[in-house]
Image (cartoon, grey):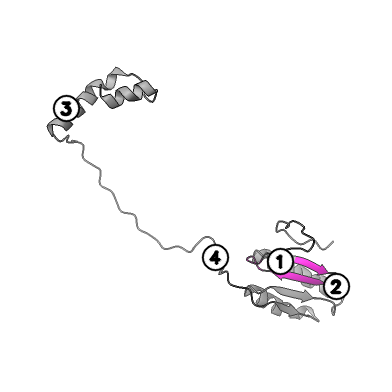
Amino acid sequence: MTALRNAMVYLGLAEDDKRYDEYDDQYVDDYETGHEIVDEERAAEVTPLRRVPSAPAVREVEVTQMNRITTIHPSTYNDARAIGESFRSNTPVIMNLTDMDDSDAKRLVDFAAGLVFGLHGSIERVTNKVFLLSPEHIEVDAEGGEPAQPRALFNQS
């Protein structure tokens, strides 16, 4: 038995198994005499895999210094396009609905909630009819030190 094996058995890292003594002795003899151990088994042929380019599973957003916030004062539901285009270009949007009647304002808030959900953003109520739409790479700290809420669907009630 080799000195290394004896040390491993002494330290409890290996069991004192006599089955491997002959193999260890043969390996040490071959190593000391310079004989090369030749493996007579033939390796199986390997078929190379073809790499198929694929689109990344997660879309990475380029994080840059925020230098612009868009404020939009919609008067009808048709102004939803301007809100969507600004938010889609990763620009935070302040949506001021004070000039709209309640039914159209509610429709626009529903549109904005779907927009931020689809683009992994968030929506915050600033006042009764003013909302902040933030892209996913923008972190909003609420005044008063309240902990950040997990992103979820916006509840109008």
At x 62%, y 66%, the residue is 137
Ranked by sequence position, the earlier of labels 4 and 1 is 4
Sequence-earlier tag: 1 or 2: 2
User: What's the amino acid at mark 1?
Assistant: Gly
Give how far across and how far down residue 84 sits, in percent: 68, 75
Mark 4 neighbour density, 10 Å: few (under 14) some (14–19) many (20 or more): few
User: Of circles 4 and 1, which is in front?
Assistant: 4
Name the front one of labels 2 and 4: 4
The residue that mark 1 highlights is: 114
Q: Quadrant of the N terminus?
A: top left
User: Dot 3: few (<14), some (14–19), or many (≥20) neighbours within 10 Å?
Assistant: few
Q: Which residues are magenta?
A: 124-138
Quote the CA–CA distance across marks 1 and 2.
Answer: 17 Å
At label 2, the amino acid type is Ser
Quadrant of the snapshot with the C terminus: bottom right
Indicate whether 126 appears above or below 71: above
> Which numbered marker is on residue 60?
4
How far apart marks 4 and 1 lie (CA) works out to: 20 Å
At a point 65% along the width and 74% down the height, the residue shown is 91
**Left/right of residue 56 with respect to residue 127 in the rendered view:** left
Q: Nearer the viewer, mark 2 or mark 3?
A: 3
**Which residue is at the front of the view, 65 or 17?**
65
From the image, tell me which residue sits under label 3. Answer: 29
Q: Residue 6, how many percent across, how many down?
A: 30, 22
SS class of the residue under badge 4?
loop
The residue under label 2 is 103
Look at label 4 and name its amino acid.
Glu
Q: CA distance from mark 4 to mark 3?
A: 59 Å
